[in-house]
Image (cartoon, rainbow, N blue to C red):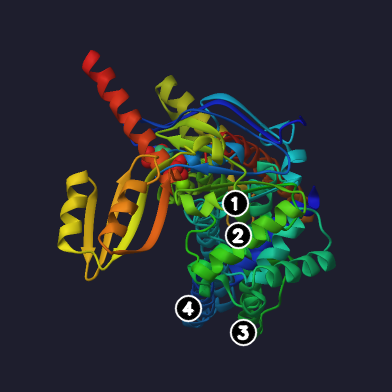
Amino acid sequence: MIGRILTIGLNTFREAIRNKILYSLLFFAVLVIVGSLAFGALSVHEEVRLTTDLGLAGMSLFSILIAIFVGVNLVYKELERKTIYSLIPKPIHRYQFVVGKFLGMVLTLGVQVAIMGAVLQLVLLLQDAELSGALYRMMALIFLEVIVVTAVAVLFSSFSTPFLSGLFTLGIFLIGRSVPDLRRISRKLKSPAAALLLDGVARVVPNLRLFYATGSDAGGGHVTVHGLFPDWSYVASAGGYALLCVAIALMLASLFFSRRDFI
Amino acid sequence: MSRPVLVVERLAKTYAVGFLRKKVHAVVDVSLSVEPGEIFGLLGPNGAGKTTTLKVLMGLVRPSAGRVELLGQPVGSLEAKRRLGYLPESPYFYDYLTGRELLVFMAKLFGLPRREARRRADALLEQVGLAQAADLALRRYSKGMLQRVGVAQALVNDPELVILDEPMTGLDPLGRKDLRELIASLRQAGKTVLLSSHILSDVELLADRVAILVRGRSVDVGPLPELLDARTLSTELVLTGASAELLAAIAELGHTVRRSGDRVQVTVTGSDAPDALVDLCRKHGASIAEVAPRKESLEDVVVKRVRAEGEQRERAEAAR
Ligand SMILES: Nc1ncnc2c1ncn2[C@@H]1O[C@H](COP(=O)(O)OP(=O)(O)O)[C@@H](O)[C@H]1O
Ligand SMILES: [Mg+2]
């Protein structure tokens, strides 16, 4: 059972690494991270700080965009090219297809995040910066967020067109990043109906702010990679939260997938 | 009689198309059953519902009505899926894989270990004549090569039941011959084959029994000789050295005459032997180059059925 999921996952990974578009996206991301070096150099005293912030932001943004692209595309292509016609009649369950595809994407994105992370480290070393453990914990959190966004993209593309799926996923990402703000605003709203609605949205959408911890109030007080930053136990609990989100998204995706006609 | 390998009973499938959910009746009423070890042909013009019927069998689309059973299991059962192979219509596969990689991937989905999967892939590539193209990306395959690799992936698990949707399309005459031989060898090996086609001659040579589909209905199911009228419909004679006098006499008898150069083709309708005509020719000193009785072909049956179906519909519409 696991074997078939892995077979599909590894094939998805192979598809991704043989895809030229992904290389150009990765190249662009690396360019931005290296570019943050130039920006860092502009600020005379704070160069490491600025490079780190810009580099992490660029890394997060690009890997999220690639996650949406990959998540939407790799499912849609199976349907559009009708490669799924010869897959469904093989002895696999449809959920195995969904989970296998997802794992292949996660592997692909893991490699991409690792490459971006390595480039950022290199850039920082060039500036004689001291690499802190906080930096690695932040990178791990970025990867966790990427995983959640990928699962959301797979969920949408299990029933929608790639364009709409991409749009919806981007929307969920933007709302997810603002969940704490939504909660705050909903408490201040005068209309109880509007407050309830906003609070409801904040509860349904995954709280992605938990993952982009630097510069936020994660784990109590204000934290940043340059000073106080949550430890690995925070990363672990964020991982648990990510796992929960992924499980829910993939369960729904499998449900939609098992009900649809492949026409 | 042993238990059928495949049963389709009163199957219907209606698609809802587009924003307005317009209904398209792809399959209206199809019933057939396939016995173990036979080659069964699904015949019908384009749009008759062959592909849709096979897609229901493969669990790709869900039926709107009717009952379907495969290898004694309901559609979608893993147990049945392990024992069957399927070639989709105009197949397309992961184009970033090579032929060998595709077959290894498919074999692994059946749980074959890597080494065995490779061995199986190489044997199949050899069998369908793609050994040379084993390491070529599928993106570079021609239509006929894709069809061949499609047949190979349908056989990767050495299935008991092989379902092929229009397997001959895209193949050149040599490829068709190869595939016919391959299908015949499957029968030799005791497999059951269900294949669809709109080209009747492809099936005519192979199938033990056929179902004829017209507009979503199975209008005829049975062994070919039973579906075809055994009587001679007409006889064609080719004459040489016919005089004008003779041609006039033949025309008087009411036969159709066509000439090309020295050769004259005469069609005698009906099932009787054309003795009178032969005598006439002898008398006029013409020689008879060819005599060919023409029996009902599958084409005739389908054309007849399509026409009858159309007339029935017109009558029904007129009655309304
Ligand atoms: N996905 C689909 N959506 C809507 N109509 C379809 C779809 N697939 C097939 N049809 C229609 O159903 C009918 C039967 O099609 P099909 O099963 O492909 O026939 P065949 O394989 O015998 O040529 C055709 O009229 C076709 O237009
Ligand atoms: Mg068809």
Q: Is residue B77 left or right of residue A38?
A: right
Q: Position of residue A91 (x, y in %)?
A: 73, 46
Label 3 and label 1 in one chain: no
Q: Residues within 10 Å of mark 1 (few under 14, many from 20)?
A: some
Whether label 3 lies within 8 Å of ligand 1 gets the answer no
Look at the numbered discs 4 and 1 and tell me whether their residues touch, using CB distance below 8 Å: no
Q: Chain of mark 1?
A: B
Look at the numbered discs 3 and 1 and tell me whether their residues touch, using CB distance below 8 Å: no
Q: Position of residue B125 (x, y in %)?
A: 68, 70
Label 4 and label 1 in one chain: no
The three-letter code of the residue at mark 2 reads Arg
Mark 2 or 3: in front is: 2
User: What residue is disc 1 on?
Assistant: B206
Whether label 2 lies within 8 Å of ligand 2 gets the answer no
Front residue of B231 and A70? B231
The kind of secondary structure element at disc 4 is helix
Distance between mark 1 and mark 2 Cα atoms? 7 Å
Q: Is residue B303 left or right of residue B148?
A: left
Which picture quadrant has residue B309?
top left
User: What residue is disc 2 on?
Assistant: B180
Front residue of A255 and B159? B159
Look at the numbered discs 1 and 2 and tell me whether their residues touch, using CB distance below 8 Å: yes
Q: Residues within 10 Å of mark 4 (few under 14, many from 20)?
A: some
User: What residue is disc 4 on?
Assistant: A39
Distance between mark 2 and mark 3 Cα atoms? 70 Å
The three-letter code of the residue at mark 3 reads Gln
Is B303 located above or below residue A199 in the figure?
below
Distance between mark 4 and mark 3 Cα atoms? 12 Å
User: What residue is disc 3 on?
Assistant: A127
